[in-house]
Image (tube, rainbow, N blue to C red):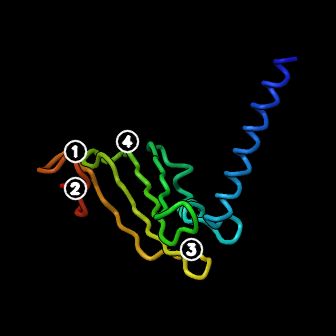
Amino acid sequence: MKHIWIISAVCLAAFSGCATTKNLVNKVGVGAAETPLAQVLSERSDLKKNLATVEIRQYFNRVESPTVAEVKVTETGLLDDSVRSIRTVYSFKNLDGQWKRVNTQKEYQCYRGGNTKAFQKGKCP
């Protein structure tokens, strides 16, 4: 009998967490307008077919009612022997409930040259 109460409590806690996540996603704007991540994925369909390793991260300026977002797409393992990684940073603003892209910036991490550790705006030598 004690096990049933413990299992019930764990299930209740898990379902409460799901409800909280659902509320949080609604505040970010999923459903009202395409999220920044969804916009990038629909534009960059090549990421699904790309042979490189792809890392995608979405950032918001705050958890509740964000106004600014950033999506970073980092591609590693490219066929170009001078480029270690390419990072594309997409910047968005939430204007009247719609996420609008305001800037796109491409950065390169090189195998050769004076700067092989950090990303740079110029193309690799």
Mark 2 and 1 residues: CB-CB less than 8 Å, in contact? yes
Indicate the quadrant where residue 52 lies. top left
The Cα–Cα distance between marks 2 and 1, rounded to whole angstroms, is: 8 Å
Sooner in the amino-acid sequence: mark 3 or mark 4: 4
Mark 3 and 1 residues: CB-CB less than 8 Å, in contact? no
Sooner in the amino-acid sequence: mark 4 or mark 1: 4
Judge left or right: residue 70 versus residue 118: right
Q: Amino acid at mark 3?
A: Trp
**Around disc 3, counting alpha carbons within 10 Å, would you say few (fewer than 14), some (14 to 19), or many (20 or more)?**
many
* Viewer-closest of 104 and 24: 24
Indicate the quadrant where residue 73 lies. bottom left
Q: Can you give x and y, in whole percent of width and height, for residue 65 in the image?
A: 58, 68
* Viewer-closest of 90 and 84: 90
Please give the name of the residue rendered at 48% of the width and 52% of the height, measured from the top-left corner: 57
Of circles 3 and 4, which is in front? 3
State the mark number for residue 124: 2
* Callout 3: SS: strand
Of circles 3 and 1, which is in front? 3
* Callout 2: SS: loop
Please give the name of the residue rendered at 69% of the width and 51% of the height, measured from the top-left corner: 20
Q: Amino acid at mark 2?
A: Cys
Of circles 2 and 3, which is in front? 3
Judge left or right: residue 32 versus residue 66: right
Residue at the spot of label 1: 111
Mark 2 and 3 residues: CB-CB less than 8 Å, in contact? no
The Cα–Cα distance between marks 4 and 1, rounded to whole angstroms, is: 11 Å
The Cα–Cα distance between marks 3 and 1, rounded to whole angstroms, is: 36 Å
Residue at the spot of label 3: 99
* Callout 4: SS: loop
Residue at the spot of label 4: 77
Please give the name of the residue rendered at 17% of the width and 46% of the height, measured from the top-left corner: 112
Judge left or right: residue 2 versus residue 46: right
